């Protein structure tokens, strides 16, 4: 049996992407909002408030987490592109998953994710190739290139979408 925490496997960090790999990762980032929206389509409140695994977040928390995380990533990309080797601020994802607005309907965060990813993809598609080697300092993860961030968040969207789709499959929710 696969580990429900990592339905598509663990992320493997990569510092440099080929142009084709980079384009694929950006396409995955572009597709993430629609994929997440499809994953929750038709679920009722009881299903949305079901944890995707024992001890895990609910589907609702996962849906609200993705734009929280991706907003951080977008802003980190902007800092990386506009500041020489910035040090970014980490945050406690668990604490963020328990703030009051995370009880809102999933559509609130799905709409946010749509707009955020349109902006983010425009940014990434406009960045000169050489700038994907620029770096930032993450206090927990060390030095990270823009390529590494792009690859990580391409995986991150698929990872959380798979939490929901694998739950749907296990529960027989069609």
Image (cartoon, rainbow, N blue to C red):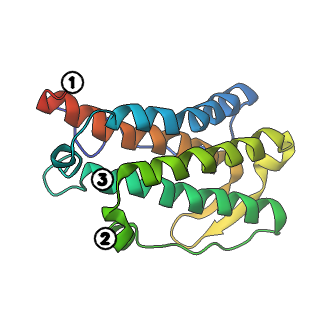
Residue matched to label 3: 60
Please identify the quadrant where the N terminus is shown: top left
Where is residue 130 shown, x and y percent of the image? 85, 44
Question: Is label 3 in contact with label 2 (beta carbons under 8 Å)?
Answer: no
Question: Is 154 displayed left or right of 133 in the figure?
Answer: left
Q: Are there few (<14), some (14-19), or many (20+) residues within 10 Å of tag 3?
A: many
Separation of disc 3 and disc 2 at Cα?
A: 11 Å
Residue at the (75%, 29%) spot, across then down: 19
Where is residue 27 shown, x and y percent of the image? 63, 30
Q: Does residue 134 lie above or below 23 as drawn?
A: below
Question: Is 19 displayed left or right of 88 in the figure?
Answer: right
Of pointers 2 and 1, the one earlier in the residue sequence:
2
Please identify the quadrant where the C terminus is shown: top left
Per the image, label 1 sits on a secondary structure element best described as loop
- In the rendered structure, find residue 174 and report the number of the disc placed on it: 1
Which of the two residues, 78 or 15, is positioned nearer the viewer here?
78
Separation of disc 3 and disc 1 at Cα?
A: 18 Å
Question: Is label 2 in contact with label 1 (beta carbons under 8 Å)?
Answer: no
Residue matched to label 2: 98
Which of the two residues, 46 or 74, is positioned nearer the viewer here?
46
Q: Are there few (<14), some (14-19), or many (20+) residues within 10 Å of tag 1?
A: few
Q: Are there few (<14), some (14-19), or many (20+) residues within 10 Å of tag 2?
A: some
Where is residue 141 shown, x and y percent of the image? 53, 64
Of pointers 3 and 2, the one earlier in the residue sequence:
3
Where is residue 128 shown, x and y percent of the image? 87, 42
Question: Is label 3 in contact with label 1 (beta carbons under 8 Å)?
Answer: no
Of pointers 3 and 1, the one earlier in the residue sequence:
3
- In the rendered structure, find residue 2 and report the number of the disc placed on it: none
Question: Is 165 displayed left or right of 36 in the figure?
Answer: left
């Amino acid at each position: 049996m696969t580990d429900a925490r990592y339905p598509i496997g663990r992320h493997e960090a990569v510092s440099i992407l080929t142009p084709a790999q980079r384009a694929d990762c950006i396409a995955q980032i572009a597709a993430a909002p629609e994929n997440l929206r499809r994953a929750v389509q038709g679920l009722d409140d009881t299903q949305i408030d079901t944890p995707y695994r024992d001890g895990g977040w609910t589907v609702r928390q996962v849906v609200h987490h993705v734009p929280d995380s991706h907003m951080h990533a977008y802003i980190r990309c902007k800092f990386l592109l506009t500041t020489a080797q910035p040090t970014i601020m980490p945050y406690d994802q668990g604490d963020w998953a328990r703030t009051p607005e995370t009880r809102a309907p999933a559509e609130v965060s799905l709409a946010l994710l749509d707009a955020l990813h349109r902006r983010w993809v425009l940014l990434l598609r406009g960045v000169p190739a050489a700038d994907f080697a620029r770096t930032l300092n993450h206090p927990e993860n060390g030095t990270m290139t823009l390529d590494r961030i792009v690859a990580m968040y391409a995986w991150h969207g698929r990872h959380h979408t798979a939490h929901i789709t694998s739950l749907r499959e296990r529960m027989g929710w069609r």
